[in-house]
Amino acid sequence: MSDLPEGVERRAFEGDERLATRGEPHYGEPTDGEYRAWNPDRSKLGAMLELGMDTGLVGDEAVLYLGAASGTTASHVADFAGPTYGVEFAARPVRDLLDAAEPRENLFPLLKDARKPETYAHVVEPVDAIVQDVATRGQAKVATANAEFLREDGRLLLAIKARSEDVTRDPADVFDDALAELESVYEVLETRRLTPHHDDHLGVVATPR
Ligand code: SAM
């Protein structure tokens, strides 16, 4: 089981040991007034940590988060990381993402399309980690298109949702194709199915070639 990043702890909430980060509650999650529970059933990165994947995260790193949605996971990331750039292309969830950023001065919401990194390249600095959870077709392509932001020894922490690529195919085949596409740009270090937290999702840890 890998170490958790600094700033992520296991704490008791309602009698259960749960992952937790220190920060303002954002989506009605249990809090003890200082730490708030991070539910792996609602977060692919939370599931990757819960399942003991070696994310390489130590805390305080610069992060590019692709598919930030309303900030459920991005808010936890900003609690323990350094500058956290949250890219989301749907306007509606970005409103909630802005609320998450209000008490977190290191969280920067960007209403942008992750398939067009050139539209935010002037804002985003080189990062130590890319966290990606876009759940749309072409997930490997999004990851390779954004590799330019990742430092040489950085980590891509990717969740691939099989059904977003093709609902009719066997997820194992979808994952194989996505990994083959990633390999042109990244070395894949670890993969793991995210069950029981997320069905037909593959967690991937990779580093630039
Ligand atoms: N990561 C979020 C969390 O844990 O809180 C949930 C993300 S949700 C599964 C996927 C999100 O990716 C959606 O909000 C969707 O609008 C966004 N998305 C999909 N394609 C995108 C793209 N090309 N650029 C930016 N956001 C995208």
Image (cartoon, rainbow, N blue to C red):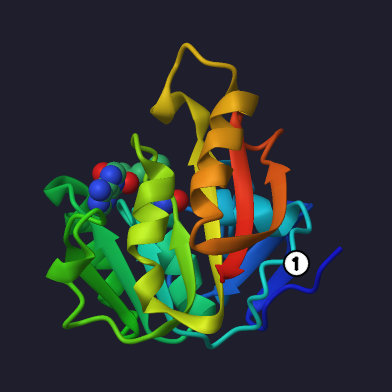
- Residue where numbered disc 1 is placed: 10
Q: Quadrant of the N terminus?
A: bottom right
Residue 207 versus residue 197 in the image, above or below: below
Q: Which residue lies at the image location 73% right of the left edge and 55% below the top edge?
A: 50
**Residue nearer the viewer, 208 or 41:** 208
Out of 96 and 140, give the one closest to the viewer. 140
What x and y, as percent, mark residue 109? 23, 69
Name the residue rendered at 35%, 65% in the picture: 146
Q: Is residue 147 above or below residue 68?
A: below
Q: Secondary structure at mark 1?
A: strand
Q: Position of residue 167 (x, y in %)?
A: 45, 16
Give the farthest residue toward the right.
Answer: 1
Question: Which quarter of the rendering shows the C terminus?
Answer: bottom right
Tell me the kind of residue under disc 1.
Arg
- Work out whether residue 32 can be spotted: no
The image quadrant of residue 104 is bottom left
Q: Quadrant of residue 113?
A: bottom left
Q: In the image, is 132 to the left or to the right of 30?
A: left
Location of residue 72 by image quarter: bottom left
Image coordinates for residue 136, horizontal then vertical, percent: 34, 37
User: Does residue 97 appear to the left or right of 49 in the view shown?
Assistant: left
Q: Residue at x 43, y 82 (%)?
A: 127
Whether residue 166 is visible here, answered yes or no, is: yes
Residue closest to the far front: 184
Mark 1 neighbour density, 10 Å: few (under 14) some (14–19) many (20 or more): some
In-image side of 144 versus 45 (left or right): left
